[in-house]
Image: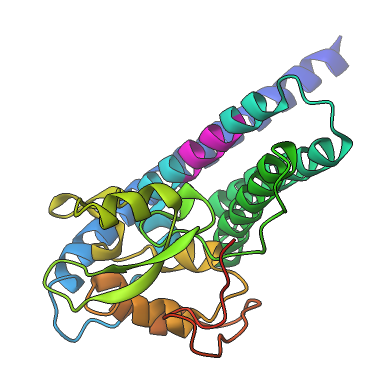
Amino acid sequence: MYVWVALALALASCAFMAVSLMTLRTVRRERALLAAARAVAATSESPEYAGAGLLADENVAAGAMLGTILEADVTALNARLSAARTGVVDLGVKAELDRVADRLREATTEAHLWRTVPEGRDHLRAATGALASAGRHLVRATAIGTGRPAPVDAPPCLCDPAHGPAAAEATWAPDGGLPRRIPVCEADYTRISAGRSAAVRSVIGPGGQQPYYDIPGYGDWLLGYFTGYDPYLVARLLDGTVLGRQLPGRIGGGAHRRAGGSSGEFGTVHFA
């Protein structure tokens, strides 16, 4: 009997310690988030702001919104994958869709690690890099299923990387900025060509809903989507924006290739 009492007391003690630890982590996270929000508001107005060492913990600073964005992107791709699987018999299409599912699982795992591992910016980049790869495989599956040649790899749509791979280049400028040619998805190319505004990703910042490139803290999120492409060129494409000033301070590590040639602002990128 004494053994059972001792065991019960030990379990109760472990449970108390676990709850205490979770409470302490929650308090620390809330304090860090408040401090980060104040830092964002202060630094985003500074003309010298360059993004290097933006916050003591950028993951905490952008955690709530980035977590929501990642979840929304994974959910949307899962829905598109489910729709694409309906009635599929072609083995080539099935293989591509299996790769989409693999990349989505990878993105989910990396997103979880980003939330839990200190200084986990590499996991954030890996998560969005996996989402970009999933989008490319989904486009290939669609092409194979409709009898078209599988498109070559293309960078994501700069207006919103979650739109998937770019289908063309379009002349675009951020508010108050100079025009430049950027990679865009087919839908945004149609909008811009018709004189309408592109469907730019909108996020919540110190000033309310704003384009993602006008909010500090989204550098690693964006660079992950553009894994394999020159990050400095991505920064130049966003010249004149908050994120364009931040990116040079966030570039480091990762697998990127420098673009070359002269076929548009993005170098030797060819669109199907």
**Quadrant of the frame with the N terminus:** top right
Q: Main secondary structure of the magenta part?
A: helix
Q: Residue 199, percent across and down?
A: 30, 48
Determine the residue positioned at 65% across, 64% down: 153
Magenta-tinted stretch: 70-78
Determine the residue positioned at 79% across, 21% down: 6
- Apparent side of residue 62 relative to residue 144 in the rendered image (left or right): left
Considering only vertical position in the picture, is 223 above or below 178? above
Nearest the viewer among 16 and 181 is 181
16 drawn magenta: no
Q: Which color scheme is applied?
A: rainbow
Q: Residue 56, percent across and down?
A: 38, 70
Considering only vertical position in the picture, is 79 above or below 166? above
Residue 10 location, quadrant: top right
Nearest the viewer among 46 and 198 is 198
Residue sitting at the far front: 147
Q: Residue 45, percent across and down?
A: 12, 72
76 drawn magenta: yes
Determine the residue positioned at 23% across, 73% down: 241
Considering only vertical position in the picture, is 157 above or below 209? below
Tell me if residue 57 can be seen. Answer: no
Residue 229 location, quadrant: bottom right
- Apparent side of residue 111 relative to residue 63 in the rendered image (left or right): right
